[in-house]
Structures are given as structure tokens and as C-alpha cells.
Amino acid sequence: MMSLRGKIEFAELTDTGRVREHNEDAIGSDGDIGLMVLADGMGGYNAGEVASGIAVQIVSELATEAAAREDRDEIDPHSGLMRQSIILRDAVYRANKIIYQTAQSQTHCEGMGTTIVACMFYDNKVSIAHVGDSRAYRLRDGQFEQVTLDHSLLQELVDRGFYSAEEAQRSTNRNYVTRALGVEPTVEVEVHEHEVLPGDFYLLCSDGLPDMVEDEDIHLTISTFNASLDVVSQQLVELANNHGGRDNVSVMLAQVLDSFAAKQSLFKRIAGLFR
């Protein structure tokens, strides 16, 4: 398995914020396999912490095991997705099942759930899986864009033309998610694949960041402090807290330093000679 250390730089930070007593966000990463996982839990009696913790643990463990088991970048014939996308998607399915079963069997966990956004880098690509309103952004050549669409009531209203994107940014009803892990026995996981270029920045965050900080200010912060991803993380969390810090806030950053194309197998290289 090709390690991505030296090809991609990572940083992460999570903070309780200024209002909440507990941090119900959870984050986890593995720089060798290019994995980042972020979950934002919900539910009473700190059960949100349980849900997000399970989500990050299960997805991290299953993705790491699967990445170590095989070193092939294959396309699944049924879905058209790369193997890494299937790994992420199936790991999120599994996390949903375990959170749901725990919520059903433990009275103090009743009603808990969590959003999740996870990504895996491989072969100059990234697979991103998400459920809920935790987000992924990309900064490329000065262009900053959200690459996930929230599974939220507000996003549905935007999609149907009731709100513009600018009006949605200012709306106070931003936190009604239409999908979360652990609420139903099964969940629909959204998965997308993107080409990756050297110089790209990727940001995963819980809604505690965009609810407090405008996208333009997130963009400006990454552009200004990009010499150190740790400083970018600290500045983003500080911005959210300075603007009220009404929620937990978590950020995970990846900066692509160099190309990381997968090494072709000997069979593929020989086969290529005869095309």
C-alpha cells in the first residue's frame, strides 16, 4: 500500500465552542491512507458524543482494515464507483447500523444520531461520503467551493427555489437535517469522486463553522495562513468562537503537496504495451 505521507499534509482541530457544555463532535484521521472522518452528534444526555464517537471509530477502523487488505484501484461494475468509495460508503452503512442498534438497546442513548463527512485520497483522486450537514469544501486556484450538498430542510428549500444561496446563508433555520446516522435502520449515503491536483486544499467541517463564519471568510483564512495548516485550523476555530461559538466546531484540513498516482501492477504495464 502506497503511503501518502509527504504527498498530502493534514491538520485537525475540534473545540466545544462558547455555549455548549460538551463537545459532541468527533474527528479521526490516518495520514498514511489519506483518510479524514468528521461527525457531529446529536441527542440528549450527551448521547450525541456516543453517536459521533461510534461513527468515527467504525469508519476509521473499517477503512484502515480495507485499505491494508488490498492494494488495487478497481471500479465496481454495479455502481461505477472506485473501490475506495465503496469502502467509505459501506463503512458509513455499518456505522449507521451500530448507532441505530445502540440507540434502540440503551435507554440513555435513545434518539441519538450524528452527521458524518469522510474522505479518502488515492491515485490523484478523493472519494467523499457524507450524511447530514457536515461539509467538505475545496480551494483550488483561488476558487473556493462547497463540494458536498447539505442533507437539510434549508438545502431542499434552496433546491426548490424558495431561497437563494445568499438568503440561506443568513437563515436562522439551518439546523434541520433530513438525513443522519442512527435514526433509521438504513440510511442513504451520498458519495462523490473528484480529481485532485497539487496545490488543492480540502476542508471538512461540522456546521459549527459555516453557521458562524461566512464562506468568503473561511476562504480568506485558508488563503492568508496557508503556510501552516495548524494555524489555519486555529484561526478558523477562533473565528467561529469570536462570532458567538454557539455550537461545537471541528475542522480537518488537507493540502495536496505532490501528485500521488498509484503504481500500476506489472500485469497492467505489460498489457498497456499491446494496446
Image (cartoon, rainbow, N blue to C red):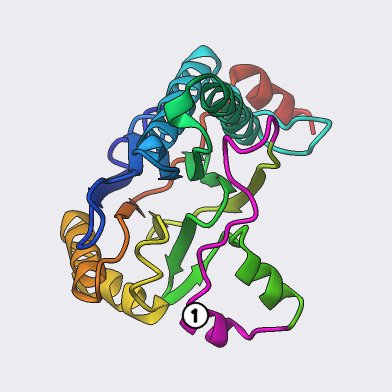
Q: Position of residue 164 (x, y in %)?
A: 63, 86
Q: Is residue 163 above or below residue 58?
A: below
Which residue shows up at 48% across the image and 77% down it? Answer: 172
Q: Which residues are magenta?
A: 162-186
Counting from the top left corner in percent of width and height, residue 226 is at 23, 65
Viewer-nearest residue: 104 or 271:
104
Q: Specify the quadrant of the image occupied by residue 153.
A: bottom right
Task: Count numbered badges in the picture.
Answer: 1
Residue 19, magenta (yes or no): no
**In front: 251, or 244?**
244
The residue to which callout 1 is attached is 169
Q: Amino acid at mark 1?
A: Gln
Q: Check the image and report above or below for 254 versus 18.
A: above
Tell me the SS state at disc 1: helix
> Could you say which quadrant of the image residue 212 lies in?
bottom left
Outermost residue, top side: 69
Q: Is residue 151 left or right of residue 123?
A: right
Residue projecting furthest to the front: 107
Q: Position of residue 132 (x, y in %)?
A: 57, 52
Residue at coordinates 40% horizontally, 55% vertically from top-left? 206
The majority secondary structure of the magenta stretch comes to loop
